[in-house]
Amino acid sequence: MERRSEIFDAIRAKPGITFRELARELGVGIGDLQYHLWKLEKEGRIFSRRAGRRRYIFPRGLEEDAQRLLIAISTDTRRRILLLLMEGPMGQKELAETLGLSQPTVSYHMSELVRLGIVKAERSGKNVVYTLSYDPETVVRLIREYRPSLWERLADGLIDLLTSVGDEK
């Protein structure tokens, strides 16, 4: 029971944590973790959502918007895309160039963000322009509230990104 409480506390502290990340952080074996997660789900204390190949674990009662956003920020590339879109709408080519990624890579991440409802895609001639579905202040609030340590890394990343964009001009 002590192990289960430890697992539940870790999920409450870091909602949207992936199964593998939780196992790594707690040093718990896969089978042991699966058992305790199954029990916690059966008790109605947690639930999980699958997105792509990952399973994200949340405490029961977490708002839907927060769930989608926490899944969206689970990868570095998507976090960087969201930071750029907080500045305003951007096209796929512009995102790819700014991030130093291929257009197919950006396309993949954008389709995931659109599917999650975090980003809207609007066709403009041959181009697709992406905008945030959320007010940037909402994004900031949710990140600060649910992942404060991530907020510090995002701020550092934004400073690096803006500095590199400024150097190119």
Image (cartoon, helix red, strand yellow):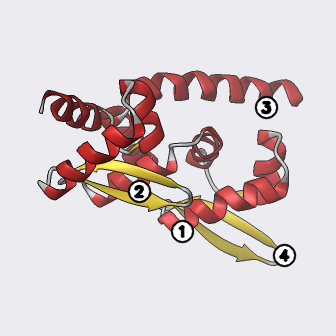
Amino acid type at mark 2: Arg
Which disc number belongs to residue 126?
Answer: 4
Image position of 3 with respect to 39: above or below: above
Q: Quadrant of the C terminus?
A: top right
Residue 15 in view (yes/no)? no
Q: Quadrant of residue 53?
A: bottom right
* Residue at the extreme front: 31
Q: Nearer the viewer, mark 2 or mark 4?
A: 2
User: Disc 4 on helix, strand or loop?
Assistant: loop
Amino acid type at mark 4: Lys
Could you give the CA–CA distance between mark 3 and mark 2, rounded to whole angstroms?
29 Å
User: Disc 3 on helix, strand or loop?
Assistant: helix
Residue that carries the numbered disc 3 in the rendered image: 165
Q: Please report whichever mark, 3 or 2, sits nearer to the chain's N-terminal start.
A: 2
Instruction: Kindly identify the residue that appears in the image at 41 percent across and 56 percent down.
Output: 68
Image position of 20 with respect to 149: above or below: below
Q: Position of residue 158 (x, y in %)?
A: 61, 29
Q: Nearer the viewer, mark 3 or mark 1?
A: 1
Q: Residues within 10 Å of mark 1 (few under 14, many from 20)?
A: few
Q: Please report whichever mark, 2 or 4, sits nearer to the chain's N-terminal start.
A: 2
Q: Nearer the viewer, mark 1 or mark 4?
A: 1
Q: Please report whichever mark, 4 or 3, sits nearer to the chain's N-terminal start.
A: 4
Residue that carries the numbered disc 2 in the rendered image: 68
Q: Position of residue 23 (x, y in %)?
A: 41, 33
* Residue at the extreme right: 168
Which disc number belongs to residue 115?
Answer: 1
Instruction: Kindly identify the residue that appears in the image at 25 percent across and 52 percent down.
Output: 38
Image position of 66 with respect to 148: above or below: below
Q: In screen coordinates, is 123 left or right of 42? A: right
